Amino acid sequence: MCCLFGLMDYRRTLNGRQKSRLVSCLATESEARGTDAAGIAYNASGRLRIYKRPGPAHRLPFRIPEDTRVVMGHTRLTTQGSAAHNRNNHPFAGRVPGTRFALAHNGVLYNDLSLRRSHGLPSTRIETDSYVAVQLIEQQRALTPASLKEMAEAVEGSFVFTILDEQDNLYVVKGDNPFCLLHFPRIGLYLYASTETILQQAVARTWLRWEQAEEVSVSSGDILSINRRGEVQIDHFEMGWELYPHCRRWGRFSPCPPEPRYLEQLKSVAASFGYTAEQIDQLLLEGWSTDEIEDALYGCDYL
């Protein structure tokens, strides 16, 4: 139950103070989905920078430089790899010929260890399951929609990935986890977060509440690319539903099994909305994914 968040100021209409305010609001609202660690990636003074720390996002001083166009952020609920070791926290750094990149992930991957064996990936001190996505991209020696497609079709589990390169290209690889993207065309700005509720709450705390916004549709199986000029391209990958035939019931897909810490946190959140642990267990038995349940708790009307 981590959260992705970020912005793209493709017309450079915002100053550093405005961008810092937006990032701070987004990060603080994203604590609803994780307080174990927080981090951001951005380009400034000609190079990619990653700033991350253990602990809740509101404790991090976000100071975004004037020349930064894109900020890619993450708040973490730990499922694998202690947040006390900062190497396990998001975003993660990667490199392919021609560019460095940063990657952040919301979800849980179940086949990271088997992928490291089958693909001969190098050993690493990073214990987080998400890092295998970085290694798979690096192994292909390219950061393109095609290499992201290969990565997305190799991993098993629940996911949305965001990737930022040194040229300020932002990629979104959407599996079955929630993701919301808003476009503010008058000022040339994109904002995103893992849920619409988090995004709207962040916007309501800033001057953007008076700006007209359009939601950009991003569906499961999409690879969305936004370049530094704000131009959007959409490619696709095959969702691996067939990988979990024993977990599909009543037309729903549920990655299995839910990670114990994640499930414990989900039940705790559900209790604050008046739902019992037994009711959550029943939904899982009926084939609901943990992210479908979470999405319902945060504002959808089908629970």
Image (tube, helix red, strand yellow):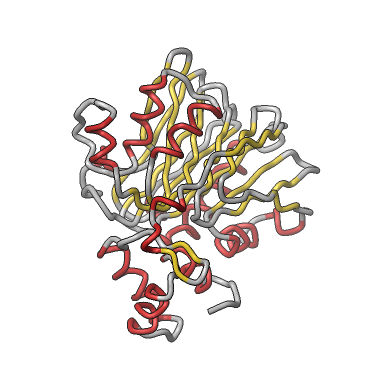
Question: Residue 252's spot in the image, x, y percent?
Answer: 50, 66
Question: Residue 2's spot in the image, x, y percent?
Answer: 40, 55
What residue appears at the point 44 percent right and 49 percent down from the top-left corner? 159
What residue appears at the point 38 percent right and 78 percent down from the top-left corner? 280
Which quadrant of the figure contains the N terminus?
A: bottom left
Q: How many marks?
A: 0
Question: Residue 4's spot in the image, x, y percent?
Answer: 48, 49
In this view, the residue in front, 74 or 69, is: 74
In this view, the residue in front, 237 or 55, is: 237
Q: Is residue 164 above or below residue 178?
A: above
- Please identify the quarter of the rendering in which residue 138 is found: top left
In this view, the residue in front, 30 or 115, is: 115
What residue appears at the point 67 percent right and 38 percent down from the top-left corner? 14
Q: Is residue 120 above or below residue 162?
A: above
Question: Residue 9's spot in the image, x, y percent?
Answer: 65, 36
What residue appears at the point 21 percent right and 31 percent down from the top-left corner? 124
Q: Is residue 191 above or below residue 132?
A: below
- Left or right of residue 131, residue 141 in this image: right
